Image (tube, coloured by chain):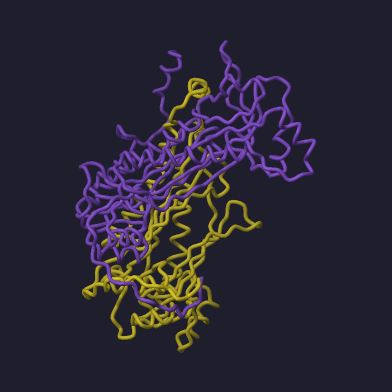
Chain colours: A purple, B yellow
Amino acid sequence: MGFFNQRRDEDPGTEPVNAQGVPTAAEQRLAEITGGEFFTSTLDVEEFALLSLLGPAPVAQVMGASVHQVGWQYLPPSAQWGDEVYCPLTAVMQAWDDARRHAFLRLTEEAWTVQADAVVGVTLKRGEHDWARGSVDYVVSGTAIRDPKLVTAPGTPVLSDLSVQEYWKLACAGWAPAGLVATTSVFFIAQSIGTKWRRRASVASNQELTEYSRGFSEARKTAISMLRGQAERVGADGIVGVEFDHDVSRAKLDVAKFYGYQAGYQSGQSGYRSSSVSTTTLALGGQPSNQGRDSRSGIVVTIQAVGTAIRRQQRLEMPAPQAVMRMGMAV
Amino acid sequence: MSDPAYDAGSLTGVPDVARARLDQNKEGLFTSDLTVNEFLLITEAGFDPLGLVVGSSIFHIGLQVANPGKNQEMTVLSEAMYQARDLAMTRMEEEADDLGADGIVGVRLDIGRYDWGAHTAEFIAVGTAVRHHEGVLHRAPNGRPFTSDLSGQAFWTLLRTGHRPVGMVMGNCVYHVARRGPLRTIGQTGRNVELPNFTQALYSARELAMQRMQSEAKALGAKGIVGVDLQEKSHGWGNHTIEFFAIGTAIVATDTKTAITTPTTVLDLNDR
């Protein structure tokens, strides 16, 4: 690949970036803010008002982005025998992880430029762009704030997807955010050939699709255990507000052979994502069986989980709850 | 980016029908799109609604051909999208100025497209003009009525924190994302790699939009910006051309130092 590597420095970009990939424009924008005379924020007015009570002033709106290409993905050699398959698609998971890690790193870098202690209201946007097929992308943005009470290692602002209201409530109850945890787990599930034909014969009866049930729960479990690992690494006591998001698509993957390359990761025309799968399709075993065992048809389950890891700190004075009845209409 | 000149008292962009409507409002009848709660809170904050104000501009967006292999800003398109929005906002401000308003709350900025005009778009700004009861001037330092996309509730809360809106600030950037060259694509086939040119295109375009919004706020002498909304849209320019648009409300500190009371936790007796 040496020949191609030589050409890689031909960058079509016009805007200069620094070593972490943060554009110079961002550094300039943030440098204007660092003085403390001026701020920008994505906070709504209620959050802004509450933040002034907490003490820290809003500092700046910060952002990070990364687009990542998914490498070749094969099924393990054991998949060629026509048995049930559920395996993690490690190359795809790796791509999601890398994209997210880069985006978080740049967000943290921007937040550190303005000497923030924390970033609240971080939103993760997973993008789909026609111009980057077969790739995954993340854009994360939030508001960097200063909170003198928050204990952080220098250079590492604490990220969280909490609103200021939630941040405040947690602070009152004696909790502080420890970091944003996010994982992606991608699993491939295929029925065995025998099951597929048995299901076709008994399509009129109600039955559990056990391999799919197992595959889905496996994917979810993987996502959760990775979340837990991340939370432990930041020294958290718990995770709040975890949101799961899942996406199911049909795919045909090649089985890895010991004697060299077959074709790469493919799922029809549309690259990595494709249309959702109906329950009838699942019951019938995905697409019609393929003749050779070089590839397997099945479904790809992508589970995205995001939450905020929190840890105990000193409890603040919290007044007893007061009963109210709203006079306005319920929304 | 150009800033259309604004003369106090000018009604250049306002049609005759609108002038008649504004005259009705001046006689004492107010119109508004406020909800009951918003109306009560705005009144409580010391303001009277004067009338709905509208600004509109139908704009022909020019053409610009991008170099397929280059990440670049499409300056012609960026300027068109900015100027059109600015014209709509200025016309709305002129209507508010004619009513003798201090400012406009609840501004919505929309883009409409019609079958009858390719490459044209209507930019519409709608809001409710308000004036302070006791004649305390709340205009922006440049003499324009303030604009804000805050709801009545948010407006009330903001005043209670000792701040007031001075104007909506915006920045945009239409950006062309380069295609990957064939050699590059082959070189990256099958590998798990970051695609730096795509990353950079997305990132830089957003940063440019945010930076422009920030300089507008600075020019207004604002202390900060709240409620920034960052949108990403492709207005029919094909896959590779995207507009990033950032809009928020710039605020300044007022003399009144009324901090909000510490919130109490409440137990809601309603079912929902």
Q: Is residue A112 above or below residue A94?
A: below
Q: Nearer the viewer, residue B214 or A253?
A: A253
Q: Where residue A75 sits: x, y (%)?
A: 57, 24
- Corner quadrant of residue A293: top right
Q: Nearer the viewer, residue B75 or B183?
A: B183
- Corner quadrant of residue A274: top right
How many numbered marks appear?
0
The residue lying at 66 percent from left, 29 percent from top is A297
Q: Nearer the viewer, residue B229 or B63?
A: B229
In the displayed structure, does residue B51 sit left or right of residue A30?
A: right
In the displayed structure, does residue A115 sit left or right of residue B165?
A: left
Q: Is residue A287 above or below residue A127?
A: above
Q: Where residue A250 sits: x, y (%)?
A: 64, 36
Check the image and name the residue furthest to the top. A259
Q: Where residue A211 sits: x, y (%)?
A: 63, 36
The residue lying at 46 percent from left, 50 percent from top is A243
Q: Where residue A87 sits: x, y (%)?
A: 55, 30
Q: Is residue B159 above or below residue A33?
A: below
